[in-house]
Amino acid sequence: MKGGCHCGAIRYEAKRSPSYSGFCHCRDCQRITGTGHCCYMIFDRSDVIATGSCRGYQTIAANGNISIRHFCETCGSQVFGSGLPDDGRLTVYAGTLDDLSEFTPTDAIFTRSRPKWDRAAMALQECEALPG
């Protein structure tokens, strides 16, 4: 799996498949993405090679652990997430993949915070581009 930020200043490659992936509906992910959820993949840190410079933003997650969001310093794209460096895991946000078909969600978490309008099975009108 390969990907990067919007401007290309950050690039990464994952050497193995994620240990798990899915949709996170927590309020932090909603606020940081401006949507009803984020699409995430969890890797062992040693399985992801990255180039470029990130800026970190640290908060306390709902479970009391430290959560760090890593953004491109140039374009502001959120590319990675992590806890403390010694936890051995790295989150990669699926929207940053070069090939989005490589993302296969396995679960949805924090569904208690999921908005009623954020349902994959909703019967919504679909548009391939912006509506005319």
Image (cartoon, rainbow, N blue to C red):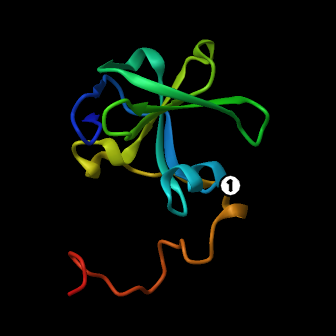
> Is 76 positioned to the left or the right of 66 in the image?
left
Give the residue number, with chain letter if any, for mark 1: 110
Instruction: Name the residue located 26 percent from the left edge and 81 percent from the top edge.
Output: 127
> Is 61 positioned to the left or the right of 74 in the image?
right
Give the percent coordinates (x, y) of residue 12: 29, 26
Instruction: Name the residue located 50 percent from the left edge and 62 percent from the top edge.
Output: 35
Give the percent coordinates (x, y) of residue 61: 71, 38
Tag 1 secondary structure: loop
Q: Quadrant of the N terminus?
A: top left
Residue situated in front as seen by the camera: 104 or 57: 57
Instruction: Name the residue located 48 percent from the left edge and 77 percent from the top edge.
Output: 121
Give the percent coordinates (x, y) of residue 52: 29, 20
Residue situated in front as seen by the camera: 51 or 43: 51
Q: Name the amino acid, label 1.
A: Phe
Residue situated in front as seen by the camera: 62 or 46: 62
Give the percent coordinates (x, y) of residue 129: 21, 75
- Seen in the picture, residue 55 relative to 62 is either above or below; the reply is above
Q: Residues within 10 Å of mark 1 (few under 14, many from 20)?
A: some
- Seen in the picture, residue 22 relative to 5 is either above or below; the reply is below
